[in-house]
Amino acid sequence: HGHTALLKLDAGSHQSARLHPGWVKLMVLSGELKIGDQTLQSHEMFMIPANTAYTVDALTEVYCLAISELDGVELAR
């Protein structure tokens, strides 16, 4: 089973490369963040395919909604 979470990221924060066993959909509610080389702004969505490594950088304070297909996360090497 997956889950849905409301996330708050502080401006300038960085999340190391990670991957999930299922897809993850992110909707930016406010702020601006970078996922890999994609920059997302308020009201934009992004889908991360299953088992795809990615990093997250908050360019400003960010609130986003994360919906995952399956539970679990693994730090990429």
Image: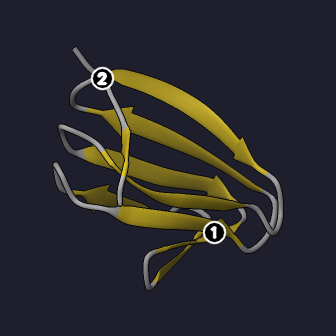
Instruction: Identify which residue, 16 or 39, lies in the foreground.
Output: 16
Residue 57, which numbered label?
A: 1
- Helix, strand or loop status at disc 1: strand
Q: Quadrant of the N terminus?
A: top left
Q: Is residue 8 above or below residue 27?
A: above
Q: CA distance from mark 2 to mark 1?
A: 22 Å
Please give left or right for residue 16 compared with residue 4 in the image.
right
Please give left or right for residue 54 compared with residue 28 in the image.
left
**Quadrant in the picture for residue 7:** top right
**Residue type, label 1:** Asp
**Quadrant in the picture for residue 76:** bottom left
The crowding category of the residue bearing disc 1, from other C-alpha atoms within 10 Å (few below 14, some 14 to 19, many at least 20), is: many
The residue shown at (76%, 61%) is 13
- Helix, strand or loop status at disc 2: loop
Which x, y percent locates residue 59? Answer: 74, 74
Give the residue at the far top of this rendering.
1
The answer to the question of whether label 2 and label 1 lie on touching residues, with beta carbons closer than 8 A, is no
User: Which of the two labelled residues, at mark 2 and mark 1, occupies the earlier sequence position?
Assistant: 1
Residue underneath mark 2 = 71
Give the residue at the far front of this rendering.
77
Q: Is residue 52 above or below residue 57?
A: above
Q: Is residue 70 above or below residue 40?
A: above
The residue shown at (38%, 65%) is 54
Which x, y percent locates residue 42? Answer: 62, 65
The residue shown at (28%, 58%) is 47
Which x, y percent locates residue 20? Answer: 28, 42
Q: Quadrant of the C terminus?
A: bottom left
**Residue type, label 2:** Asp
